[in-house]
Image (cartoon, rainbow, N blue to C red):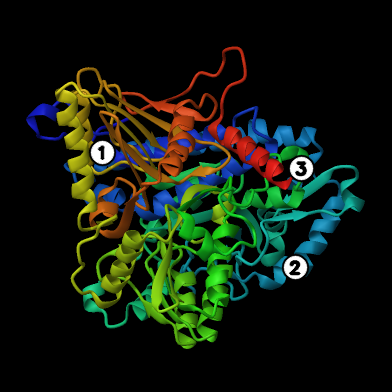
Amino acid sequence: MSHSSAPTSADTANVKFLDRDHSILAFNERVLDGAKRADVPLLERLRFLCIVSSNLDEFFEVRAALHLTAAQNEEQKGSYSAASFKELSAATHDIVARQYSLYNDELMPAFEKHGIKIVSHGDRNAAQRAWVKAYFEREVRPLLIPVGLDPSHPFPQVANKSLNFIVRLGGRDAFGRENDIAIVKVPRVLPRLIRMPEKVSGKLRCFVSLSSVIRAHLDELFPGREVGQFSQFRVTRHSDLAVDEDDVKNLRTALRLGLEQRHYGQAVRLEVSAGCSEHLSGFLLTQFNLPPESLYRVHGPVNLYRLTQLVDLVNDPKLLFPPYKACYPIQLTPGQSFFERLKQGDVSVHQPFESFDGVLDFLREAVNDPQVLAIKQTIYRTGSDSELMVLLREAVRRGKEVMVVLELKARFDEEANINWAEMLESIGAQVVYGVVGLKTHAKMLLVTRREGHHLRRYAHLSTGNYNPRTARLYTDVSYLTADAALTADIDNVFVHLASQSKLPKLHRLLMAPFQLHRKLIEQIDALGEAAAQGKDTRIVAKMNALTDEAMMLALVRAGQRGVKIDLVVRGACMLPAQLPGVTDNIRVRSIIGRFLEHSRVFYFRCAGEETLYLSSADWMNRNMLRRVELAWTVTDPVIRQRIVDECLVAYLHDGKDAWDLQADGSYLRVDSSGPGEHHSAQIALMARYTANSETTER
């Protein structure tokens, strides 16, 4: 893996940070390994393969444009250059080639052994071809508009990640002209996989891809012309919305306009069929102003991600992970008032092993309780169909004061959030969009309740989003509290976000972009000083990404002074581990399992004194300095130990889903080839909570 700039501090001059973009690609290589694993059910292996495609789409949409532009401008220096573009192109081409090799050589033959087959045109029998033709005429052809290119029919606008065909035609058109190139755009509304009926499939479960249906009938779209060369193609465009917040009067309106333009941004990648002729691929590269390195010839559908439809269409329990039903949070009793329970002490919920239903029930009780006067909440990603938003709407209807800090700039969730903002505003909720120039990524919910002659606050904080769907798939920690100091801090943050007044001193919260970055670095440095004095010190931190240079330098300094440091970083990590003489005391591992690791947990120990933070923030520059983020201390010793055991210790002992980062930036999967049962933290936690649930039910 390539390296980026070296730090300049004298005591850390020997460390070179790993390249961020290559580290992102290394994460996708680990995800791709999930599609290879024999211990993973077949449909889940396909799901891993599709996730890689989705991740690569986002990588190109967000990270590729700067490298491509630098190459086109022949830049030779800096992080973005002609060389960086070529290196990234080579790495992504390698991943894509391995994806399709796995798809064609392993997964598809394995599906056929289970009687599941995606039947190509060449393999269809007469009955199947007749059925496909009828389907084409009935469902597909009416939605296709082929465009023959000439001066009055220029190359059409091709939307980001849409399926299209390019065709080279022989003969003359209806007006006697020899325009030989045509484009067929395929509507997104059409399913990419279609199951053929039993009468033509026999005992097999047979499917056809939409691209093969269209390919088989291209000649019918051009009567009187000879269809020669053709290929499916798909273009990926730069899609990171850029809005000058200081120069717009209404952020919501500006973002909605940006969403309309996003589908037609700068082209950054072109995918075509492996057999696409040089003439057609060259024509497309010219149209999209792309160099040859941006061309990806694929042996299969140009969008593997759409094959997730096969998982749903087959839906065979034998080919899926065993079903897991999250238990109700073990610190809660169904039917008990949350307000009475939280007066007894704080509650933590470890999702998805414990159900997000506990959080929804907390909000539901607040909505239905006539003594609750106000509800304040941040929203980053909640989805387009959210029960939580329905509850907030009901709270407004019942006359409660509802304030929502809704982040409109949550990448690829902008449209859903704009729609929710408009709905809430239309019924009288107070909606604010955070602070100009900052994304509000903090997750907090505050309930104010009248109790006798006093007002009392109750709150929920989380490391993850208020999204019931992803709460079943992501590991996160929810935290419910009635602690007076913590809830007062939360209220002050809400007031700050709404009024933009000066933030008062916080007692239990650390907040970015103010003191969170500085306080964490101070804590790391303090442990380094303690270690140099011979004290027992320890840092264990779990996060999604580690790319902030100042925090990495602090970790290097602490490690060099004797602090033992373990980092559990699922995604990009720019800090090389176990580099002799530099990061000998730092170990980094990544967990890739059934659930997406998403919780942020930071543990510091000095001479027996422990501090544990939960946080919404990764250790990235953007989180620390360009977002509103929160971290809070866990003071209850029982909850603290439970989180340490489940979110940190369990993953440090994982022998099944873990990868260890090497000094050169490569990852090695933890050796699980020895005898005996090997520990998977996620599987162990599922078993633990299933047992707890069964015990409770008895």
Quadrant containing the C terminus in the rendered view = top right
108 left or right of 342 in image:
right
Which residue corresponds to the image point at 74% horizontal and 37% vertical from the top-left? Answer: 111
Residue underneath mark 1: 83
Tell which circle, 2 or 1, labels the residue nearer the N-terminal end.
1
Residue lying furthest left:
10
In the rendering, at what x and y percent does residue 128 appear? 84, 51
Looking at the rendered structure, the kind of residue marked 3 is Pro
Find residue 458 and report its image quarter. Answer: bottom left
Q: Amino acid at mark 1?
A: Ala
Mark 2: amino acid: Glu
Residue at 89%, 51% (x, y): give it: 198
Compared with 226, 352 (above or below) is above
Q: Position of residue 275 (x, y in %)?
A: 57, 43
Q: Which mark is residue 317?
A: 3
What kind of element bears circle 1?
A: helix
Mark before the other along the chain sequence, 1 or 3: 1
- 3D distance between C-alphas at marks 1 and 3: 47 Å
Estimate the spatial distance between the alpha carbons at disc 2 and disc 1, rounded to whole Å. Answer: 47 Å
